[in-house]
Amino acid sequence: MTEIEQVRLDMGGFEVNSYVVHAPGGDLIVDAGAEPEQIFAALQKPVVAILITHGHRDHVGALEDVRRETGAPVYAHPMDAEGSEIGNYEPLRDGEDLVMAGETFHVLHTPGHSPGSVTFVVGKDQIVGDLILPGSVGRTDLSGASWEEIEVSLRKVMPLWDDSTRLYAGHGPVLEAMKELRDNPYLPLGVL
């Protein structure tokens, strides 16, 4: 059975999350912001892929170390990967299903916090990067960010939620989707 393990990392005085997905056929790493040794300590099996939710430095700062150590291919959206420090990567496409290590990762392009932000849907759960944060959403005052696109992206992911959906955010704790729906003032009403 697939398990998603949260790895809280210290990135210059604030915390960022990486995740290790323990799939039947191997481990996958989602985001590699800092402290690669903590990511390595969470691994249980060989790493088959490194997935990137978005290309901001706090989510890819340790990518080269992790890539070098694991030898795993990197998957990112071209709108964040081109011209960034991500380097060589496999392009992610909206709506595609990546089947890796016996698990399916449904890819949703969810821009707003950055042009190439993506959400990975794993079963009922979603690895949302900085699209949704505890009681908030990702910043839209950064270059390439857009409040209008965040709203569209939220309307894309929210219809997939049910009472068991967990949201694995780029910062903060793992979230219960329905609790965020009740408590997060930034989520659009009437979507579910």
Image (spheres, helix red, strand yellow):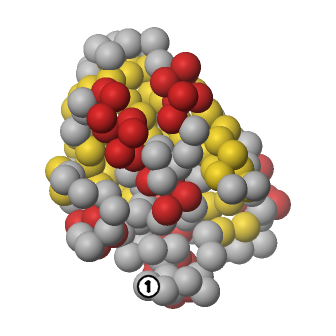
Residue 156 relative to residue 46: left or right: right
Badge 1 marks a residue whose secondary structure is loop
Identify the residue shown where x is 53% and y is 68%.
Answer: 154
Reading the image, the residue beneath label 1 is 144
Q: Is residue 62 left or right of residue 70?
A: right
Is 127 rendered above or below residue 138? above
Q: Residue at x 51, y 35 (%)?
A: 36
Q: Quadrant of residue 92?
A: bottom left
Query: Picture coordinates of residue 104 (x, y %)?
Result: 30, 33
Location of residue 135 in the rendering, given as x and y in whole percent from the top left corner: 77, 62
**Figure check: 45 above or below 62:** above
Q: Quadrant of the image for the C terminus?
A: bottom right
Relative to 79, does residue 67 appear above or below in the rendering? above
Q: Is residue 88 visible?
A: yes
Q: Amino acid at mark 1?
A: Gly
Residue 52: x %, y % from top left: 38, 51
Quick check: 134 above or below 7? below
Between 5 and 158, the one nearer to me in the picture: 5
Quarter where residue 76 is shown: bottom left
Q: Is residue 176 visible?
A: no
